[in-house]
Image (cartoon, rainbow, N blue to C red):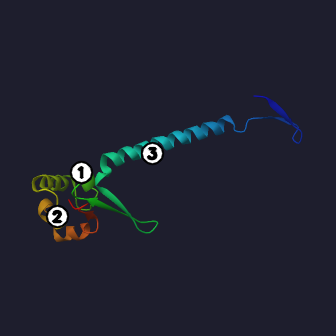
Amino acid sequence: MPEEDDPQAGKKRSSRWVTRAEAGAVLILTLVFLVWTTVVVVRQRRTGEGIEVVHGRADEFVYLVDVNAAGAADLRLLPGIGEVRAERIIAWRNEQGPFQDVEELKEAAGLSERDMKRLRGLVTLGQKR
Protein backbone atom coordinates (compact mmCIF):
# COMPACT_ATOMS: atom_id res chain seq x y z
CA MET A 1 0.00 0.00 0.00
CA PRO A 2 1.27 3.47 -0.73
CA GLU A 3 2.08 5.56 2.27
CA GLU A 4 1.68 9.29 2.63
CA ASP A 5 3.51 11.73 4.87
CA ASP A 6 1.46 13.04 7.75
CA PRO A 7 2.74 16.58 8.20
CA GLN A 8 1.19 17.00 11.65
CA ALA A 9 2.62 13.86 13.26
CA GLY A 10 5.78 13.62 11.22
CA LYS A 11 4.90 9.98 10.56
CA LYS A 12 3.89 8.05 7.52
CA ARG A 13 0.33 6.78 7.44
CA SER A 14 -1.40 4.23 5.25
CA SER A 15 -3.84 5.46 2.64
CA ARG A 16 -6.15 2.51 3.47
CA TRP A 17 -9.52 3.39 4.91
CA VAL A 18 -9.74 0.19 6.92
CA THR A 19 -6.95 -1.75 8.55
CA ARG A 20 -6.57 -5.48 8.03
CA ALA A 21 -7.65 -6.13 11.62
CA GLU A 22 -10.84 -4.10 11.11
CA ALA A 23 -11.60 -5.87 7.83
CA GLY A 24 -11.03 -9.24 9.52
CA ALA A 25 -13.37 -8.31 12.36
CA VAL A 26 -16.09 -7.25 9.91
CA LEU A 27 -15.66 -10.50 7.98
CA ILE A 28 -15.95 -12.60 11.14
CA LEU A 29 -19.05 -10.72 12.32
CA THR A 30 -20.64 -11.12 8.89
CA LEU A 31 -19.98 -14.87 8.89
CA VAL A 32 -21.39 -15.25 12.41
CA PHE A 33 -24.53 -13.35 11.37
CA LEU A 34 -25.00 -15.51 8.26
CA VAL A 35 -24.58 -18.74 10.21
CA TRP A 36 -26.98 -17.56 12.93
CA THR A 37 -29.58 -16.52 10.33
CA THR A 38 -29.28 -19.89 8.59
CA VAL A 39 -29.80 -21.75 11.86
CA VAL A 40 -32.89 -19.67 12.69
CA VAL A 41 -34.42 -20.23 9.25
CA VAL A 42 -33.75 -23.97 9.32
CA ARG A 43 -35.24 -24.32 12.82
CA GLN A 44 -38.28 -22.31 11.81
CA ARG A 45 -38.87 -24.44 8.75
CA ARG A 46 -38.32 -27.63 10.70
CA THR A 47 -40.46 -26.88 13.76
CA GLY A 48 -42.15 -23.50 13.35
CA GLU A 49 -45.13 -24.67 11.33
CA GLY A 50 -47.40 -24.97 14.36
CA ILE A 51 -46.30 -21.89 16.28
CA GLU A 52 -47.70 -18.40 16.06
CA VAL A 53 -46.00 -15.50 17.84
CA VAL A 54 -48.28 -12.95 19.44
CA HIS A 55 -46.60 -9.71 20.42
CA GLY A 56 -47.53 -8.09 23.69
CA ARG A 57 -45.39 -5.52 25.41
CA ALA A 58 -41.94 -5.00 23.98
CA ASP A 59 -40.39 -7.36 26.53
CA GLU A 60 -43.08 -10.03 26.36
CA PHE A 61 -43.87 -12.61 23.72
CA VAL A 62 -46.55 -15.27 23.80
CA TYR A 63 -46.16 -18.31 21.59
CA LEU A 64 -49.44 -19.94 20.58
CA VAL A 65 -49.07 -23.57 19.61
CA ASP A 66 -51.53 -24.84 17.01
CA VAL A 67 -52.41 -28.30 18.33
CA ASN A 68 -53.79 -29.26 14.91
CA ALA A 69 -50.50 -28.58 13.09
CA ALA A 70 -47.73 -28.78 15.70
CA GLY A 71 -45.21 -31.57 15.78
CA ALA A 72 -43.93 -33.24 18.94
CA ALA A 73 -41.11 -30.70 19.39
CA ASP A 74 -43.55 -27.79 19.27
CA LEU A 75 -46.01 -29.47 21.64
CA ARG A 76 -43.22 -30.06 24.16
CA LEU A 77 -42.81 -26.29 24.43
CA LEU A 78 -46.09 -26.24 26.36
CA PRO A 79 -46.05 -26.53 30.16
CA GLY A 80 -46.90 -30.05 31.33
CA ILE A 81 -46.41 -31.60 27.89
CA GLY A 82 -43.48 -33.95 27.64
CA GLU A 83 -42.53 -36.50 25.04
CA VAL A 84 -45.22 -39.03 26.00
CA ARG A 85 -48.09 -36.53 26.09
CA ALA A 86 -46.95 -34.93 22.82
CA GLU A 87 -47.03 -38.33 21.12
CA ARG A 88 -50.50 -39.02 22.61
CA ILE A 89 -51.81 -35.72 21.22
CA ILE A 90 -50.43 -36.49 17.75
CA ALA A 91 -51.80 -40.04 17.81
CA TRP A 92 -55.25 -38.80 18.89
CA ARG A 93 -55.19 -36.14 16.16
CA ASN A 94 -54.23 -38.74 13.53
CA GLU A 95 -57.03 -41.10 14.63
CA GLN A 96 -59.81 -38.60 15.43
CA GLY A 97 -59.00 -35.77 13.04
CA PRO A 98 -58.34 -32.13 13.96
CA PHE A 99 -59.23 -30.92 17.42
CA GLN A 100 -62.50 -29.00 17.43
CA ASP A 101 -62.20 -27.76 21.01
CA VAL A 102 -59.19 -27.17 23.26
CA GLU A 103 -60.94 -29.23 25.96
CA GLU A 104 -60.39 -32.35 23.82
CA LEU A 105 -56.76 -32.20 24.94
CA LYS A 106 -57.88 -33.58 28.32
CA GLU A 107 -58.97 -36.82 26.69
CA ALA A 108 -56.18 -36.92 24.11
CA ALA A 109 -53.25 -36.48 26.50
CA GLY A 110 -54.76 -37.35 29.86
CA LEU A 111 -54.49 -33.78 31.16
CA SER A 112 -55.91 -32.62 34.47
CA GLU A 113 -57.95 -29.46 34.95
CA ARG A 114 -54.86 -27.88 36.50
CA ASP A 115 -52.86 -28.69 33.35
CA MET A 116 -55.64 -27.25 31.19
CA LYS A 117 -55.63 -23.96 33.12
CA ARG A 118 -51.95 -23.51 32.22
CA LEU A 119 -52.52 -24.43 28.56
CA ARG A 120 -55.68 -22.52 27.63
CA GLY A 121 -53.94 -19.25 26.79
CA LEU A 122 -51.07 -20.96 24.97
CA VAL A 123 -52.82 -23.18 22.43
CA THR A 124 -54.89 -22.53 19.36
CA LEU A 125 -56.79 -24.72 16.97
CA GLY A 126 -55.38 -22.88 13.97
CA GLN A 127 -57.60 -22.03 11.06
CA LYS A 128 -60.94 -23.74 11.03
CA ARG A 129 -60.79 -26.62 8.60
Q: Quadrant of residue 30?
A: top right
Determine the secondary structure under disc 3.
Answer: helix
Task: Specify few, some or many for label 3: CA neighbours under 10 Å numbering under 14, 14-19, or 20 or more.
Answer: few
Which residue is pictured at 73% across the width and 35% down the height? 16
Which residue is pictured at 55% across the width and 42% down the height? 29
Residue type indicated by callout 1:
Gly
Alpha carbon distance from label 3 to label 2? 36 Å
Q: Return the disc, 1 or 2, that comes first in the chain's sequence.
A: 1
Alpha carbon distance from label 3 to label 1? 22 Å
Q: Which quadrant does the C terminus fall into?
A: bottom left
**Along the line of sight, which residue is nearer the eye, 51 or 22?**
51
Which residue is pictured at 24% across the width and 51% down the height? 71
Report x, y in % for residue 68.
21, 57
Q: Which mark is residue 100?
A: 2
Determine whether, in the image, residue 36 is placed left or right of residue 117: right
Task: Specify few, some or many for label 1: CA neighbours under 10 Å numbering under 14, 14-19, or 20 or more.
Answer: many
* Residue on which the image places disc 3: 37
Determine the secondary structure under disc 2.
Answer: loop
Q: Return the disc, 3 or 1, that comes first in the chain's sequence.
A: 3
